[in-house]
Image (spheres, grey):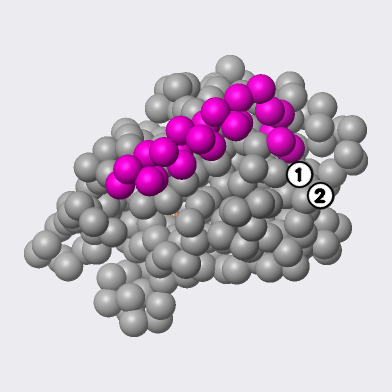
């Protein structure tokens, strides 16, 4: 990837790079700039299914992967993707710190939607032993923990793809408020077919298609990540208040240097 450099959190402890420090979110090659403009133009006026057609068919067929946490809202995107091609690669970050409910929900969605190519990503054993031998790094340095459990494995997995699809929505965080349906990030195109969806839209879709819900949602978890870093929200709290509660952090870093993430 030309022009990329690393930012290292803590050289002394040999923590891996937190994020790739990109020159920006614009492609550098003229043909990539032209293709991005073409894709953004083609995405205008399309609904989520139409944007996914753009990402998964034609000259993008076989070149695009979906990134999914199998979290509270994941069923909507996965259902839409399965409608077009159930064998689309789904990249799932199995950090080793997830709720058992999330793993079972993944298995249920795999069966019910007929997903044929879910790829579980995780740091290797050597990395785990070297960087987090006791499995408690999350309690000391959440950024470093997210880096080696999420950011690095996802970056490796995406190397074979020209584009990724995310389920991010503009309403989720301030950093996502200006998100475009098609972007360029970290050397590849990024499609955000649900960018304009609201919680009401998501609920309506789940109801209409009778999709299974993540079991933790009704237990007070509207946004679900790793178990140590997710708690129930209290009445009146924000939608993502249960994620990294008490820390100045609301993103894991896998989607960008500008703070976008699952
Ligand atoms: S969300 Fe928490 S446990 Fe999961 S990778 Fe990030 S810091 Fe580690």
Q: Which residues are magenta?
A: 29-50
Residue 12 lies left or right of residue 51; in this view the side is: left
Residue 80 lies left or right of residue 92; in this view the side is: right
Residue 71 lies left or right of residue 201; in this view the side is: left
For the image, the number of numbered tags is 2
Residue 83 — which label? 2
Where disc 1 sits, the SS reads helix
Regarding residue 55, the answer to whether it shows in the image is yes
Where disc 2 sits, the SS reads helix
Q: Measured from the top left, where is residue 32 in percent x and y? A: 39, 45
Q: Is residue 44 magenta?
A: yes
Q: Return the residue found at the far left.
A: 12
Q: CA distance from mark 1 to mark 2?
A: 5 Å
Q: Report the quarter where the N terminus lies.
A: bottom left
Q: Nearer the viewer, residue 100 or 161?
A: 161
Magenta residues: mostly which secondary structure? helix
Regarding residue 136, the answer to whether it shows in the image is no
């Amino acid at each position: 990837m030309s022009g990329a450099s690393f930012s290292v959190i803590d050289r002394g402890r040999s923590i891996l790079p937190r994020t790739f420090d990109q020159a920006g979110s614009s492609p550098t090659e003229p043909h990539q700039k032209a293709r991005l403009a073409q894709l953004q133009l083609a995405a205008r006026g399309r609904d989520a299914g139409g944007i996914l057609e753009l990402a998964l068919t034609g000259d993008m067929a076989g070149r695009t992967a979906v990134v999914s946490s199998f979290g509270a809202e994941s069923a909507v995107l996965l259902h839409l993707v399965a409608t077009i091609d159930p064998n689309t690669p789904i990249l799932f970050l199995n950090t080793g710190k997830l709720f058992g409910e999330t793993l079972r929900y993944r298995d249920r969605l795999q069966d019910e939607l007929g997903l044929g190519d879910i790829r579980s990503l995780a740091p290797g054993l050597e990395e785990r032993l070297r960087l987090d031998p006791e499995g408690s790094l999350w309690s000391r340095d959440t950024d470093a923990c997210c880096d080696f459990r999420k950011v690095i494995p996802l970056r490796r997995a995406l190397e074979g793809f020209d584009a990724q699809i995310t389920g991010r929505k503009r309403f989720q965080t301030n950093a996502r408020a200006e998100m475009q349906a098609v972007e360029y990030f970290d050397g590849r195109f990024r499609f955000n077919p649900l960018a304009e969806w609201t919680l009401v839209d998501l609920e309506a879709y789940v109801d209409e298609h009778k999709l299974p819900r993540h079991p933790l949602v009704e237990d007070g978890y509207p946004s679900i990540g790793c178990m140590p870093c997710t708690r129930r929200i209290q009445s009146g709290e924000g939608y993502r208040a249960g994620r990294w509660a008490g820390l100045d952090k609301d993103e894991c870093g896998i989607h960008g240097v500008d703070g976008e993430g699952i």
